[in-house]
Image (spheres, rainbow, N blue to C red):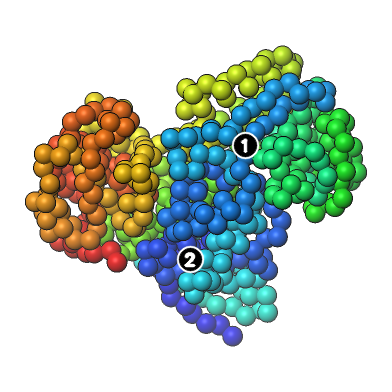
Amino acid sequence: MKTTIKTDVIIVGAGPTGLSLAVQLMRYGIDFVIFDKKEGVTDLSKALVVHARTLEIYDQVNLAEKAVQNGEIVQKGILMHDGKVSSNIDFSDFGVQLSPFPFMLVYEQSKNEHLLYEHLQHNRKDVQWQTEMESLTQDKEGVTAVLKAANGETQTVEARYLVGCDGASSPTRHFLGLNFEGSTYPRLFYVADVEMEFPAEEGTFYASLGHDSFVLVVPMQSGKHWRFIGNLPEYNDKVDREVTYDEIENKVKQLMQRPLEITNVRWFSIYKVHTRRAEKFSVGRCFLAGDAAHVHTPAGGQGMNTGIQDAYNLAWKLAFVLRGNAKDSLLQSYNEERLANAKRLLETTDQFFEVAAGDQWYFRFFRDRILPSLAGFVTQLGAAKEFLFPMVSQIGLNYRHSSLSKHQGDQKFEVKAGDRMPYFLVDGMNIYDRLRDPKFHLLVFSDGKHDYEDLKAELENKYGNLIDFNVIPLYLIVGEIFGTHRPFQVLLRPDNYIGLISTDVSLNDLQAYFDGFSDTHKRCLSTAIA
C-alpha cells in the first residue's frame, strides 16, 4: 500500500545529529518526518564525550541537567610511560568563567540518543524505525522521497526541504552525487567497552604511551564501566586478519602494567580512521549534516558534538525561511559556515591525531621526552586553559567570516561579530537563561542613564515578536570581556552567535542587518514567531 505524506522537513537518520535537528525544529513549531533503517536508538556507547557547547544547546531545551546527572565529569588525566606516571593533568576547573558547563562530560552516544528520543516522544513526536529511502527527487518547489518500511510497505513524503543525517555511508549523499573527499589512515585501531575492577581516582582517565602504540582508559560511569581506545601497530599490514578481544586486552595490559580485572566485555570493534568531507553540504533543497557531511579522527571527541552543532546551525535558518521570515538565500549560510568549520576541524584533529598516534621518530620523541613535562605544566596555567578549553569544548568556534556577521561597528571591541555570546553572570544568574527563546535577541548594555523604553517600543512595532529585548547593566566583568565601558548593543542570532555589535544603541544597524536576508519588512519581519 502506498501513501503520501506532506511535511516541512524530511530528516534522514535518527542518530545524535538527526534527533538533535528534530528537537530543534520542534522548538520552532516546524513539522518534520524523521526515519532510520535501524530498529531503534543504539545500545552501543560509540561516541564518548559531550562538550560544553553541546551542553549549552541541550540547556535551552532543559536536557543539560539530565545529561550531567547521568554522565561522568572528567576531573583528571594521568599520563603514563612504561607503566609509570609521568604527568598529572588537572581538569577540575578547566573552563571556569568560560561556560556554565566548564568541563568535559563522558556521556556516550547511546545515552545522548535516548535523551533526545525520549524528549521527542514526550512531545508526541516519533521516529519511523526500520525505514529506508528508496528514491529522492527535488525541484524548485520541494523534495520528494519514497520510503520503504521493513514490512515492504512504501510511502511518498513530500517536503520543502530534506536533511541527510544518515552517517558516513550516507545514501542521501549518494543520491545527491556528492564526492566524499579525504583519506584513510593506514593504521589499525580498536575500541572496547568493559566492566572491570581497577583502583582509580574518581573522574580520572589514563593515557599510556608506548614506543609505537597507546591506550586511553576512560571512566564511563559507576566506577566499573570503562572504555579502551588504542592502536595495534603489529596488525597495520594484516587487514584481512581477524583480531580477537584477547589480543586487545593483552595490548592494554602490556601498556598499562597495572592490575586490571576485566569481568565483562560489553562490545569491541576494530576500525581504520577516516578523515573525509563532502565537497559541499547542500544541493538545492537538500542538506547534509553530521557524519554524512564530514568524518574525522577521534582526537578530542569532536565528531558527535560537531554533528549536533550542524543541526543547531541549520534548524533556525530552515525555520525562518519556512515561516516566511527570511529569503531562501539565508540557507546558503549553512554551507558557508559549517563547511568552513569542517575544513578547520579536519586539519586540527589530523594534527592532534598525528601527535598521539604518529609513528615518525619526531612524534615518538615528543610523546616520550616533551609531552610528560609539558602537559601537567600547561594545564596549571590560567592562560593555557583559556586557550585550550574553547578549542576542545567548541565554544571557541566562530563565524567571523560569515556573510551573517556584520563588522562595521566591532573594531574597538574584544568580542567580534561571528563570535559565540560570551558567558557571564547577571545578578548571579547565567546570561544564557535570558536567551532561551528561539528568536533573535537584542541586548543593550547600559550605564543606567537611560531606560530604553522608547527603543523597546520601536523594536516591538517594527519587528513584532521576531526579536526579544534585554537591558543589562554594564558591569565591570562585561566591560572587561567586551573591551569597552561605554553603552553598547549586541544583536544575537537564534543560535546565540553575534550578528552585530555596536556602540550606536539604535535600530539603524538592526534594520540594515535584516535587510540582508529578509524579503520585505512588511511580509517577513512583522511576522511573529510563536
User: Which residue is drawn at the image coordinates 37% and 63% (left, top)?
Assistant: 28
Type of amino acid under label 1? Gln
Q: Residues within 10 Å of mark 1 (few under 14, many from 20)?
A: some
Element marked by disc 2: strand
Residue annotated with mark 2: 10
Mark toward the start of the polypeptide (1 vs 2): 2
Element marked by disc 1: loop
User: Which residue is drawn at the image coordinates 35% and 44% (left, top)?
Assistant: 428
> Could you tell me residue 207's position as x and y percent?
73, 31
Residue annotated with mark 1: 75
User: Which residue is drawn at the image coordinates 86% and 39% (left, top)?
Assistant: 260
Picture quadrant of residue 427: top left
Type of amino acid under label 2? Ile
Q: Which of the two residues, 319 or 368, is positioned nearer the viewer here? A: 368
Can see residue 514? yes
Up-down relation of residue 286 to residue 238 (above or below): below
